[in-house]
Each structure stands twice: as C-alpha cells, then as structure tokens.
Amino acid sequence: MNDTIIAFEKVSKTYRADGGLRALDDVDLEVGRGTRVAVMGQSGSGKSTLLNIACGLDEPTSGRVIFENLELAAMNDDDRTRLRREKIGMIFQTFNLLATLSAVENVSLPLRLGGISSAAALERSSAMLRRVGLQGRGGHRPDEMSGGERQRVAIARALVFNPPLLLADEPTGNLDSRTGDEILSLLDELHLELGTTIVLVTHNDEAAQHCERQIRLRDGRIVEDFQFQR
C-alpha cells in the first residue's frame, strides 16, 4: 500500500465569522504517494478551497493538513512559499504564465528562485520543454502560443523541479476537447515517468477517468470516494 503524501484531518474552512459560509466541512482525506486522485463536484462544492489549503495558500479554520509529516499551519509564510517552490507543482485553468517572459524563462523561474544558476536552469527548462512537445518554442512568449501550448509550458514549469505532488485545477477547462485529451495523455505519461502524485480538480468525467481514485465533494463534504483497479 502506498504511504501517505498529504492528509487532511477534520479540516473545515469558513469565510464568515458566524460560520455561515463553510467551504470545507470536517474533511478527512489521505492521498497515497504516487497515486492520481480526481476531485469532482459542482461549483461552490469546495474543490478549489481544498487545493488552496493543500498547498498552503490558504489555512483551515479548524483541523490539520500534513504534507510529508509537516503540518502546514505550523510553518511560516516563507517556509510555505519554499514548500510550493520545491515540493508542490501547480497548474491552472488560466495557465498563470508571465506574459513578458518567454516559454523557457517561465519554466526556468522556479529554478532561478530556488538558487539554481542561469545556465543550469536554462538547460533543465529546455529539456523539460522538449519533453512536453515544445522543442523549438522556448523563445516564444505566451501570446505567441496556442492554449494547448501554453498549458504545456505551465506543465513544464510545474514539473521542472520534479516535485512529489502536482495540483491541477481544471487544467483542460480553457481548451477544446481534442487539445484537452492531449494534455491529459501528457499528464498520464509524466505520471508514469516521474511517479508524481497528482490531485486533479475537474468538472469533466472523462478527465476524471484518467485517475484511479475519484472523490466527489458536495457542500464542502466528501460524499463519494471510489478507488478503481488499473
């Protein structure tokens, strides 16, 4: 059985002092290392809140989040920032690329922030862009690329430092179905190659089928948790 990479212990999140707006409600969740988990649910079910808490961008109102035996709430802001830079890759529906930087500069950014030399960062970033199918596109800015290409850059940036955990928030939401399928297939390949744990938030049943475990949220609670044999 896989060991646990991240765990939620009785996690709740409220956004009003009277507790009237509850995004997560007493969530218990363990994610095994090297697995792929789809988190599903309607808008407002708590999916994005769960991801934000998982990476330390937000804090639970109550309960604990443990990542690789570290409690996120016990870490200061600098430590949580370093954790995201070194241990948790993130990709988003809106790509979140810096418009003034080229593809290779976007991918290099987390390496440079981590103290890696410019030459070494460039070499690793160029290799990662080749791996995601963007050989020869490293000098292009995001506005010179298609949506699928921009998401490939975002995936390269998220995985260039080989994080043990990848959080993906609707990564195919802004893509047509064919391009979305290509991105999901790429994530399948990278998962097999790198052994990265993937937590994928999606509205899309077909996207969820790429994961061996599917969790459904409703009103901030886990209401379904299915494990499939592959």
Image (tube, grey):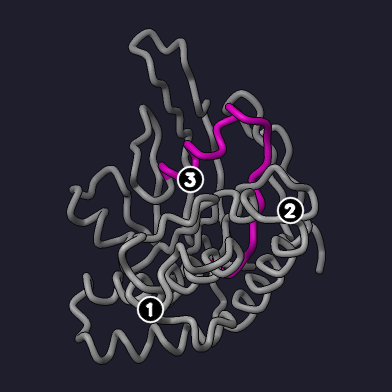
Residue 158 location, x and y as percent? 44, 68
> For this view, does 91 lie left or right of residue 45?
left
Q: Are marks 3 and 1 in contact (CB under 8 Å)?
A: no
In this view of the protein, which residue sits in the foreground, 218 or 203?
203
Above or below, 171 against 58 in this view is below
Above or below, 106 against 23 in this view is below
Residue for point 68% across, 41% down? 40
In this view of the protein, which residue sits in the foreground, 128 or 211?
128
Label 1: element kind? helix
How far apart marks 2 and 1 lie (CA) works out to 30 Å
Give the magenta part as a residue range: 32-53
> For this view, does 46 lie left or right of residue 68?
right
Q: Are marks 3 and 2 in contact (CB under 8 Å)?
A: no
Q: Earlier in the sequence, mark 3 or mark 2?
A: 3
Numbered circle sitting on residue 104: 1
How far apart marks 3 and 1 lie (CA) works out to 26 Å
Mark 3 surroundings within 10 Å by alpha-carbon count, few (fewer than 14), some (14 through 19), many (20 or more): many
Label 3: element kind? helix
Foreground label between 3 and 1: 1
List the residue tagged with mark 3.
51
Q: Quadrant of the N terminus?
A: bottom right
